[in-house]
Image (cartoon, rainbow, N blue to C red):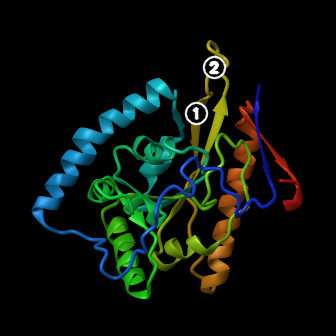
Amino acid sequence: MKRVYYYSDEMTDDFASTNGKINIDEVNGSYRYSHHSIGWRIAVFFAYRIFATPLVWLYTKIWLGVRVKNRKALKKVKGCFVYINHTQNIADAFIPTISAFPKRAYIVTGPETVSIKGIRVLVALLGAVPLPGTLSASRHFDQKLKEAMDEKAAVYIYPEAHIWPYCNFIRNFPDKSFSYPCRTGSPVVAAVTVYRQRRVFKKHHPKITVYLSDPFYPDASLPGKQARKKLRDEVFAYMEQTAKEHNSFEYVKYIHCSPSQK
């Protein structure tokens, strides 16, 4: 029987299995976004390239059946921001690594990713860039994004913010995060996770295809707010159209209702 979720607000409802289970620490000015020591770079190489990347490849390719379409889009640019829909609890932490390869992938995350004691350093090594909670942290956050662009890396952003498992349509999202590419003058690639039914074991979770757009660029002739809105609208249009064209399977059903009906 197909699982059904009832929602009233696309921008605030959250169906993540970890929702409310993590005590979230504020990311303040004491959080260290950037590391420049040789020791840190060596640790990143072993954690990201030697340890994580092969495991991620095995998990995404064999277990999830992930395919990536138009991977060459990321080869057309140096550093870039990638905006992608948020439809997986675990896989969304791995899809950036496999779709950006051989580029280094970073993921802009909520502060909960660095709030779990024992793995804070590991998630930072693997590319988590938590959203800042204070003004001083914001300056360090912005500097980290600039460094990622200089590194010719791909910074992944989930603008829908909340996880809706296996959702096969694009939810409305704000334009606030599009200020990052506008401020740095960086290209943007839109990415869409869609689902396809398995040919065998059809009751098992569906396989995943990730479609990448050709690059979009901030319009430098527009004021900041207008430029980020234009960029957001271009990305949203691509994501919405791609989801409609290629989402061939509904594994989870989402039904809109009023708040009183939930």
Q: Are marks 2 and 1 in contact (CB under 8 Å)?
A: no
Q: x%, y% of residue 82?
A: 51, 57
Q: Secondary structure at mark 2?
A: loop
Instruction: Give the residue type that dot 1 points to.
Output: Ile
Residue plotted at (66% across, 40% down):
166
Does residue 78 appear anywhere in the picture?
Answer: no
Disc 2 crowd rating (10 Å Cα; few below 14, some 14-19, many 20+) is some
Q: Which residue is mark 1?
A: 208
Percent x, y of residue 246: 71, 36
Secondary structure at badge 1 equals strand
Q: Nearer the viewer, residue 216 or 157?
A: 157
Type of residue at label 2? Arg
The residue lying toward the viewer, choosing from 226 and 261, is: 261
Direction from residue 125 to residue 95 in the image, left or right? right
Tell me the residue that label 2 is attached to: 198
Mark 2 and mark 1: Cα distance apart in space: 10 Å
Looking at the image, which residue is at 71% across and 63% down?
A: 11
Residues 119 and 162: in front is: 119
Residue found at x 52% / y 27%: 65
Q: Residue at x 45, y 47 (%)?
A: 93
Q: Quadrant of residue 202?
A: top right
